[in-house]
């Protein structure tokens, strides 16, 4: 799995509204793309002028198709609206665990 995280900071409420409106319009269409596990838009609690866009993709090929798509140009437009250098990360996840990890670490039975 590959996780793409984009953090955008804007100076004004008006500009933030534009960024949020643009990214919200892309949520549904991105979520139904082949290979998209999830796509979410978050408001930063500690920094109200920032929003974070997170996508998760099944494979590098799926992510690359998305990055080359016309829709991704709109995400790039949102990045261009950032008043500070946007924080952009692509992380490859090799393993995902859940409650079993917590139970193992705490030496307890895992809830089923």
Image (cartoon, rainbow, N blue to C red):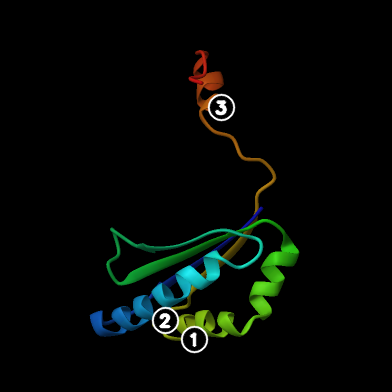
Residue 102 sits above or below residue 6 on the image? above
CB contact under 8 Å: marks 1 and 2: no
Numbered circles on residues, count = 3
Of circles 1 and 2, the one toward us is 1
Instruction: Where is residue 83? Give x, y as percent.
Output: 39, 83
Measured in 3D between alpha carbons, the distance from the residue under mark 1 to the one under mark 2, in whole angstroms, is: 9 Å
Identify the image quadrant of residue 10: bottom left
Name the residue furthest right.
61
Q: Secondary structure at mark 2?
A: loop
Instruction: Where is residue 22? Give x, y as percent.
Output: 40, 80
Q: Secondary structure at mark 3?
A: helix
Name the residue furthest top.
108
For label 2, the crowd category at 10 Å Cα-Cα, with few meaning under 14, some 14 to 19 and many 20 or more, is many
Measured in 3D between alpha carbons, the distance from the residue under mark 2 to the one under mark 3, in whole angstroms, is: 38 Å
Of circles 2 and 3, the one toward us is 3
49 vs 82, left or right, is left
Q: Report the residue marked by disc 2.
A: 82
Q: Secondary structure at mark 1?
A: helix
100 vs 17, left or right, is right
Give the residue at x 51% y 13%: 109
Measured in 3D between alpha carbons, the distance from the residue under mark 3 to the one under mark 1, in whole angstroms, is: 40 Å
Instruction: Where is residue 5? Give x, y as percent.
Output: 52, 63
CB contact under 8 Å: marks 3 and 1: no
Instruction: Where is residue 17? Give x, y as percent.
Output: 29, 79
For label 1, the crowd category at 10 Å Cα-Cα, with few meaning under 14, some 14 to 19 and many 20 or more, is few
Q: Report the residue marked by disc 3.
A: 101
100 vs 51, left or right, is right
Q: Tell me which label, 1 or 2, sits earlier in the chain.
A: 1
Q: Report the residue marked by disc 1.
A: 77
């Amino acid at each position: 799995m590959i996780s793409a995280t984009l953090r955008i900071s804007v100076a004004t409420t008006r500009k933030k509204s534009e960024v949020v409106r643009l990214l919200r319009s892309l949520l549904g269409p991105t979520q139904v793309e082949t290979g998209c596990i999830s796509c979410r838009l978050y408001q930063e609690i500690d920094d109200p002028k920032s929003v974070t866009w997170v996508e998760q993709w099944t494979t590098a090929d799926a992510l690359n198709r998305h990055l080359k798509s016309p829709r991704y140009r709109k995400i790039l437009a949102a990045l261009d609206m950032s008043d500070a250098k946007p924080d952009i990360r692509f992380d490859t996840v090799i393993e995902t665990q859940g409650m079993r990890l917590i139970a193992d670490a705490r030496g307890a039975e895992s809830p089923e």
